[in-house]
């Protein structure tokens, strides 16, 4: 999952979010700041009853909150969402992701003789760094 500080930097740089099914988000500045939520059409949990795993269903995941405004939530984009965002902002630039000795490397060929590389321990963060670069360039 993308690092919280990178998600915050992407939002500050202007990355827009239209909440959709299966998107992840967190609620910074609240008692639930350390929790990651997912937008779902029907919440289900796994519990143990008599030592056996069962699925339980609830009408509301957090009944203590009636609602929050979307701009209070911080989007935690997935690897595929980040890749799509990079490709949308640099459609003519070849984009590669490969495993590097220290994790992952996202490379953007900005010219035939120049490549920008973004290294991170997870693929999401490597893509997020590339996206942050593109957003800050705009």
Image (cartoon, rainbow, N blue to C red):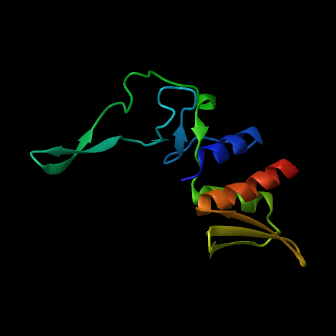
Residue 95, relative to residue 61: is it above or below?
A: below
- Residue 119 lies in quadrant: bottom right
Residue 57, relative to residue 138: is it above or below?
A: above
- Residue 78 lies in quadrant: bottom right
Residue 16, relative to residue 137: is it above or below?
A: above
Looking at the image, which residue is at 18% across and 45% down? 48
| Residue 129 relative to residue 112: left or right | left
- Residue 91 lies in quadrant: bottom right
Question: How many dots with numbers?
Answer: 0
Measured as percent of width and height from the top left, residue 131 is found at: 74, 55
Looking at the image, which residue is at 62% across and 56% down? 81
Looking at the image, which residue is at 49% across and 23% down? 67
Residue 63, relative to residue 46: is it above or below?
A: above
| Residue 115 relative to residue 103: left or right | right
| Residue 25 relative to residue 64: left or right | right
Q: Nearer the viewer, residue 103 or 14?
A: 103
Q: Residue furthest left?
A: 50
Measured as percent of width and height from the top left, residue 74 is found at: 60, 37
Q: Nearer the viewer, residue 138 or 20?
A: 138
Measured as percent of width and height from the top left, residue 37 is found at: 47, 40
Measured as percent of width and height from the top left, residue 121 is found at: 60, 62
Q: Residue furthest bottom?
A: 112
Q: Nearer the viewer, residue 96 or 3?
A: 3
């Amino acid at each position: 999952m993308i690092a919280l500080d990178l998600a915050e930097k992407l939002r500050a740089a202007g990355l827009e979010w239209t909440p959709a099914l299966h998107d992840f988000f967190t609620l910074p500045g609240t008692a639930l700041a350390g929790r990651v939520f997912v937008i779902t059409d029907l919440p289900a949990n796994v519990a143990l009853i008599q030592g056996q795993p069962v699925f339980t269903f609830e009408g509301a995941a957090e009944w203590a909150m009636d609602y929050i405004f979307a701009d209070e939530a911080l989007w935690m984009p997935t690897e595929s969402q980040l890749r799509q965002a990079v490709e949308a902002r640099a459609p003519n630039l070849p984009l590669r992701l490969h495993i590097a000795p220290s994790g992952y490397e996202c490379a953007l060929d900005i010219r035939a003789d120049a490549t920008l590389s973004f290294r991170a321990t997870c693929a999401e963060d490597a893509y997020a760094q590339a996206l942050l670069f593109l957003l800050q360039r705009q």
